[in-house]
């Protein structure tokens, strides 16, 4: 790790300093970036992370399904996935694994999620159990199990297959991630979450035919994803963004 990476890894996992743009869009001062689009966070999540991973359609007919995310942030992506899960006639058990270096406080979480009235019930359930501690936190939200790793994703990912609550819920004996939400801050501001070693570790944990989606189409991120073993494709991005990227675990990785 570089000195800069070590500084960030060693930093306390304390809450971020937030600025609120237009009243309700949180921006992390430390990274200089927003948690979701000013043009509509929920619509962006549905366009990029849900549709990009073929959800909710891929929930159909499954007994269990595992999503993993880099960057839990406000929990908006989790709640949008839970809402999508509820739209399916016979929904699977969902394991949602996410990594977060600087968990929001309950107050910050509530304020951010207040902007999405249709998610209020789930936002209340989440804030009621929200008390993140460094390391793995297992939170039960109905048929959804949230495994939240508080710390640096680059460190915690190596430990993931040793978390019994995660293995137990995926129901298949070995951790196999069906869909990745790659949601670090912009690669220029948060290169750590787009690191090739981290993406390789993600690919190793991915199921056959597992997919990924991300809002960025930065050239070096695409190359890192390919180097990690994903076949990738560019699609139309959300709102003003020309492109986004989806990917599938390349067959030769098995
Ligand atoms: C764009 S935000 C995520 C938004 C989120 N998915 C949501 O639904 O609100 C990126 C997140 O990545 C976190 N992050 C940045 N570097 C990290 C690292 N090395 N390990 C884990 N989390 C990190 C930030 O603290 C921030 O919460």
Image: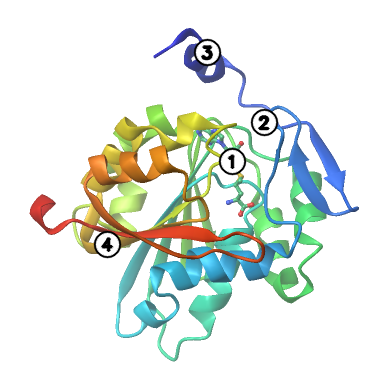
Q: Earlier in the sequence, mark 4 or mark 1?
A: 1
From what the image shows, is residue 240 above or below residue 166?
A: below
State the image coordinates of residue 169 (x, y, percent, origin top left): 33, 60
User: Considering the image in quadrants, where does the C terminus appear?
Assistant: bottom left
Can residue 179 be seen from the camera position used here? Answer: no
The residue most toward the bottom is 89
Q: Earlier in the sequence, mark 4 or mark 2?
A: 2
Q: Residue at x 38, y 78 (%)?
A: 59
Q: Earlier in the sequence, mark 2 or mark 3?
A: 3
Ligand 1 closer than 8 Å to label 1 CB: yes
The residue closer to the viewer here, 212 or 177, is 212
Marks 4 & 1, CB-CB < 8 Å contact? no
- Badge 4 density bin: few <14, some 14–19, many ≥20, Cα 10 Å: many
Per the model, the C-alpha gap separating discs 4 and 2 is 30 Å
Q: Which mark is residue 31?
A: 2
Ligand 1 closer than 8 Å to label 2 CB: yes
Q: Which residue is mark 3?
A: 4
Q: Quadrant of ligand 1?
A: top right
Q: Earlier in the sequence, mark 3 or mark 1?
A: 3
SS at circle 4: strand
From what the image shows, is residue 228 above or below residue 57?
A: above
Q: Is residue 87 left or right of residue 180?
A: right
Per the model, the C-alpha gap separating discs 4 and 1 is 23 Å
Q: Which residue is mark 1?
A: 185
Per the model, the C-alpha gap separating discs 4 and 3 is 32 Å
State the image coordinates of residue 52 (x, y, percent, origin top left): 44, 68
Q: Residue at x 48, y 59 (%)?
A: 244
């Amino acid at each position: 790790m570089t000195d800069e990476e070590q500084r960030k890894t060693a930093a306390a996992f304390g809450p971020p300093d937030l600025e609120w743009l237009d009243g309700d869009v949180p921006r992390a001062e430390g990274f200089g970036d927003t948690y979701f689009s000013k043009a509509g966070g929920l619509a962006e999540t549905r366009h990029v992370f849900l549709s990009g991973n073929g959800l909710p359609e891929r929930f159909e007919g499954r007994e269990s399904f595992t999503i993993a995310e880099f960057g839990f942030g406000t929990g908006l992506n989790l709640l949008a996935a839970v809402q999508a899960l509820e739209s399916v006639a016979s929904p699977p058990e969902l394991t949602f694994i996410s990594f977060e270096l600087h968990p929001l406080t309950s107050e910050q979480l509530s304020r951010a999620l207040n902007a999405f009235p249709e998610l209020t019930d789930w936002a209340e359930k989440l804030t009621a159990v929200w008390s993140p501690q460094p390391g793995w936190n297992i939170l039960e939200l109905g048929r959804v199990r949230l495994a939240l790793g508080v710390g640096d994703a680059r460190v915690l990912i190596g430990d993931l297959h040793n978390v019994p609550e995660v293995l137990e819920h995926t129901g298949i004996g070995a951790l196999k991630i069906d869909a990745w939400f790659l949601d670090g801050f912009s690669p220029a501001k948060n290169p750590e979450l787009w690191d090739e070693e981290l993406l390789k570790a993600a690919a190793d944990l991915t199921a056959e035919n597992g997919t990924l989606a991300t809002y960025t189409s930065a050239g070096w991120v695409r190359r890192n994803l390919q180097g990690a073993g994903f076949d990738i494709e560019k699609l139309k991005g959300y709102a003003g963004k020309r492109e986004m990227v989806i990917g599938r675990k390349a067959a030769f990785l098995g």
